[in-house]
Structures are given as structure tokens and as C-alpha cells.
Image: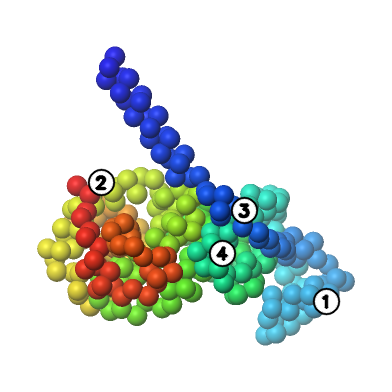
């Protein structure tokens, strides 16, 4: 009975910690902020040959000049486009929940980066262009809703599972945060594996701070099971990187093995098929987490810290 009581109390404590983790400071939630959501996807779905010229005039940036009027008229009657329109309308009859999450994300951006200005959002369809789910400028953001219909949607048949698993609405906040954080970080020009790990570690740590209300696995694009695998094997992964002398290697193949999205990581061992991809990103995240725990550094200052300095002062010890 005592053991059962202890387990029960631990479960309560765990739930309480999870609840605390999700609570957002009023200092952030009360930041005044607003943005417009323009459902261009619905407007195009309801367009007619008669009002198409007006739509083109209103949204010239969504009608590239290389396509003539007949192209767009044909698109209005295209069966595939009409099916996409119908599925998106069914999945997103409104944008309320998504808008609330993005508003909270933007408030976090404003809190940490006071110069940040929330963009207006235009929702579109893109013929399932999953490589460009979100496109953002300083004042405008395009979100392709046909890339968020759910990983088992029939539109995604034929797309590799490691990609399709993130074609879900739960990934929208991560994708938007990634777009803006990448702009803050700039390009990843470091040739050493450790430098590339730290770059993605910064990216993931910043997403974690800017969107603490989303699940941890969503931040890196893992399933719960994949995140659990990475956490359970963190020490072994690190030992492999160290023993194989990969940390300061400039071998370009390491990106494909451990950093880029992939169905699994490539240790060239029997366990490969059990592992999730991007384990180099995961370890980079843990290194940056350790650095931020052990150093008094703001999120803004984190951006400019070079990889070697960060790693040397991270005092990183993998979980056993």
C-alpha cells in the first residue's frame, strides 16, 4: 500500500510539474498584440471568373505574372484544386484555435525581442508543398493549410512517413517559430559537426522558450516514442559521437546521418531502424540547455555566442 501511495504521489507531482511548465507568466500574456487573419484559401475556393480580376488586384503577390489569366481560370475548375479546397475547408472551418496559439507565440517573441512586430497572416493552399509550409516576411506570413491536414490524410499517400508525420496542425506553431528563429540565427555556416549541432540546439532551445505551451516532441518534430528513445539512449549516442571522433569532423555526410530530417539516424549499426532521425539536433539541444542552465545569458545574447565557446562552457553531461 505504501508503494502504491508513493507511486500515486509521484504521479500527482509529475502532473503538477507539467502544469507549471505550461503556465505562462502574466507579464507575457498581457502584452498588447493583435494581427489579422485573411482566409485567402476560402476566397479562392469561392472565386468565379467574374470576381477573379478583383482577387488578383487585391493579392498581386499570390498571382505570379508568369502565369496568364487562363491558368487561373483553369485552376478554378481543376478537380484536384477543388478537392484540396474542400478538404481544407472541412479541416479548418475557422482559424480560432490556431490564431490563439500563434498570438501567444508572437507575445513571447515580443517579450524576448521587443522589436518584434506581429505579421498579418494569410492562409493559402499550395498543392501540398510541404517544403514551404510557412513563408514569412517582416509584416506578412503565408500558411499553407493543405500541409496540416493530419499525417494519415489521403493527400499524403506516397510521401515518406518521416515527413508525413509532421503534416499536422499541431506542428504549425513549431513551423512558424522555426521560420522566425532561423531568420534571427542567420545561416548555418559552421563546417564542424559540433558547430552544426549547436546551431540546431540554439534553434530548438529558442523554440522551447518562445513556445513553452506546445509539447516537447512537437518542438523537434518527433513522435512521443521517438523522443523517449532519444532520451533513453542519450548517453550512448553521445559516447558514439565522442568515440568516433565526430564532434570536430567536417565530413559533410554527417548532416545526412544525424542532422537532416530522415526516417532514422545512421550509426551503421543494427539499432539504426529503431532510432529517430536528427539525433545530432537532439544532442545539440541538450548541450544548449546545459549551457543556459550554467551561464547567465539572455535569449538575445545566445544568438551571437560561437559554438566552441558555448560547448566549452556548457558543462554538458548526457543523461544516463
Foreground pick, 74 / 57: 57
- Secondary structure type for disc 1: helix
How busy is the neighbourhood of tag 4: few (under 14 within 10 Å), some, or many (20 plus)?
A: some
Q: Are marks 2 and 4 in contact (CB under 8 Å)?
A: no
Q: CA distance from mark 3 to mark 4?
A: 11 Å
- Secondary structure type for disc 3: loop
Q: Between tags 2 and 1, which lies in front?
A: 2
What residue is shown at x 62% (from left), y 66% (from top)? 118
Q: Earlier in the sequence, mark 1 or mark 3?
A: 3
Q: CA distance from mark 1 to mark 4?
A: 38 Å
Q: Earlier in the sequence, mark 2 or mark 1?
A: 1
Q: CA distance from mark 2 to mark 1?
A: 57 Å
Q: Earlier in the sequence, mark 2 or mark 3?
A: 3
- Locate residue 198 relative to residue 219 in the image: left or right: left
| Residue 218 screen position, x and y as percent | 45, 52
Q: Earlier in the sequence, mark 1 or mark 4?
A: 1
| Residue matched to label 2 | 232
| Residue matched to label 3 | 30
How busy is the neighbourhood of tag 3: few (under 14 within 10 Å), some, or many (20 plus)?
A: few
Amino acid at each position: 500500500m505504501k508503494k502504491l501511495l508513493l507511486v500515486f504521489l509521484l504521479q500527482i507531482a509529475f502532473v503538477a510539474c507539467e502544469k507549471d511548465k505550461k503556465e505562462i507568466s502574466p507579464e507575457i500574456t498581457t502584452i498588447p498584440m493583435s494581427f489579422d487573419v485573411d482566409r485567402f484559401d476560402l476566397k479562392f475556393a469561392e472565386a468565379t471568373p467574374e470576381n477573379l480580376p478583383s482577387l488578383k488586384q487585391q493579392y498581386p503577390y499570390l498571382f505570379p505574372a508568369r502565369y496568364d489569366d487562363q491558368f487561373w481560370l483553369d485552376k478554378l475548375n481543376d478537380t484536384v484544386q477543388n478537392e484540396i479546397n474542400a478538404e481544407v475547408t472541412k479541416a479548418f472551418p475557422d482559424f480560432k484555435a490556431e490564431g490563439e496559439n500563434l498570438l501567444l507565440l508572437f507575445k513571447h517573441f515580443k517579450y524576448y525581442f521587443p522589436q518584434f512586430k506581429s505579421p498579418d497572416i494569410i492562409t493559402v493552399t499550395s498543392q501540398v508543398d510541404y517544403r514551404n509550409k510557412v513563408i514569412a516576411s517582416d509584416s506578412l506570413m503565408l500558411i499553407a493549410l493543405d500541409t496540416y491536414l493530419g499525417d494519415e490524410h489521403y493527400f499524403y499517400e506516397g510521401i515518406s512517413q518521416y515527413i508525413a508525420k509532421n503534416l499536422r496542425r499541431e506542428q504549425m506553431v513549431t513551423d512558424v517559430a522555426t521560420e522566425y528563429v532561423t531568420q534571427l540565427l542567420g545561416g548555418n555556416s559552421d563546417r564542424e559537426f559540433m558547430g552544426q549541432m549547436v546551431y540546431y540546439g540554439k534553434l530548438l532551445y529558442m523554440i522551447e522558450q518562445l513556445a513553452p505551451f506546445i509539447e516537447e516532441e512537437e518542438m523537434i518534430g518527433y513522435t512521443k516514442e521517438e523522443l523517449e528513445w532519444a532520451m533513453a539512449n542519450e548517453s550512448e549516442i553521445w559516447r558514439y559521437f565522442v568515440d568516433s571522433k565526430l564532434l570536430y569532423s567536417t565530413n559533410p555526410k554527417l548532416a545526412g546521418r544525424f542532422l537532416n530530417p530522415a526516417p532514422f539516424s545512421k550509426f551503421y549499426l543494427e539499432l539504426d531502424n529503431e532510432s529517430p532521425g536528427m539525433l545530432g539536433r537532439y544532442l545539440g539541444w541538450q548541450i544548449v540547455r546545459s549551457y543556459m542552465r550554467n551561464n547567465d545569458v539572455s535569449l538575445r545574447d545566445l544568438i551571437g555566442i560561437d559554438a566552441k565557446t558555448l560547448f566549452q562552457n556548457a558543462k554538458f553531461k548526457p543523461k544516463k
